[in-house]
Image (cartoon, rainbow, N blue to C red):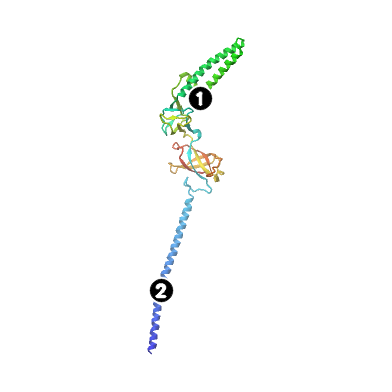
Amino acid sequence: MKKILFTLCLFALVSCGGKKQQNTQSPDNSKTADTSAIAADDSSAEMTGDSTALASNTDNSGIDGITSATSKPNEIIFNGSITATPQKHATVSMTMGGQIKSTSLLPGQFIARGGVVATVANPEFISLQQSYLDSHAQTEFLKTEFERQTTLAENEAASKKKLQQSKAEYLSMESKVQSDAAQLRLLGISPESLLKSGIQQLLIVRAPISGYVGNVYMNVGKYMQPGEPLCEIMDKSAPMLCLTSYEKDVTALKVGEDIAFRTNGFGKKVFYATIVSVGQNIDKVNHSTQVYAKIIGNNPQFRPGMYVSARVEK
């Protein structure tokens, strides 16, 4: 009887322990399920956020950096700078060296064509003027002598040898006069004015074009070698764009096409230009060429060297 009671008690204890264990495990399973659900929701939210960000990036990638408008497929975009054409950019130099005696130029200053750039001293300049004046005087004498010998030869009063000698001397001196006159003109001196006013002590260097002074390489007292630049002058009345285009876009560029561009210092304001020249040689290093465009409606604030970003208007 005791054994039967013991067995029943043991069975009851085992049954209670199983229910307790089952009840204990049930909350854990519920937590696990809740955690899985939360993780699924987070994953879904994260995916939704990533998709939104990607869509946003995709939309922004179509915004044109030039005009802030949506860009078009296969649009040609390039960079470059504002420049002056070779006809509007002058480098002032001399064919004869000399010491700078005076100059009043400053970078950024406007100078009209024919304005004084500098005065230069060189003894050779004085010698050249003297040579021209002497040759010119000798030419007049030799010309008169040649005409006299010609008249005498016609009347058989002089030998042909004298006539030929007189002619040779006259032509030789006339050639020297022309040579000296050409050298004076290269220095900006008029031979006719030299005959009237006499020898000038200083060579006056004048501006070949009207424009703004760029770099100045001279100073008072400095000796400038022949051909060495004194300064640069830029005419801003007709600036252009010098753009870099890569070879993949060259075949699509045509003279006469319109370009929209922006430049630093003008905010988001858009300007326009027209292509006037497309380079015919491709650089071997970066596989690019130069494209020139004429700016429509010049802005006086444009300066050569300003960076621009541009695109072709389709």
User: Of helix, strand and loop, which one carries label 2?
Assistant: helix
Position in image of residue 134 (x %, y %)? 50, 18
Position in image of residue 125 (x %, y %)? 46, 24
Figure quadrant of residue 104: top left
Q: Amino acid at mark 2?
A: Gln
**Closest to the observer, 182 or 225:** 225
Q: Residue furthest bottom?
A: 1
**Closest to the observer, 30 or 168:** 168
Tally of numbered tags: 2
Residue 6 is at least partly visible in this image: yes
Say if 52 sits above or below 291 in the image: below
Q: Gap in Å between the C-alphas at discs 2 and 1?
A: 113 Å
Residue pointed to by mark 2:
25
Looking at the rendered image, the disc whose residue lies closer to the viewer, 2 or 1, is 1
Q: Amino acid at mark 1?
A: Gln
4 on left or right of 292:
left
The structure residue drawn at horizontal position 39% and vertical position 83%, both measured from the top left corner, is 10
The structure residue drawn at horizontal position 47% and vertical position 39%, both measured from the top left corner, is 82
Say if 257 sits above or below 160 in the image: below
Say if 311 sits above or below 190 in the image: below
Residue pointed to by mark 1:
183
Image quadrant containing the N terminus = bottom left
Say if 219 sits above or below 180 in the image: below
The structure residue drawn at horizontal position 48% and vertical position 20%, both measured from the top left corner, is 130
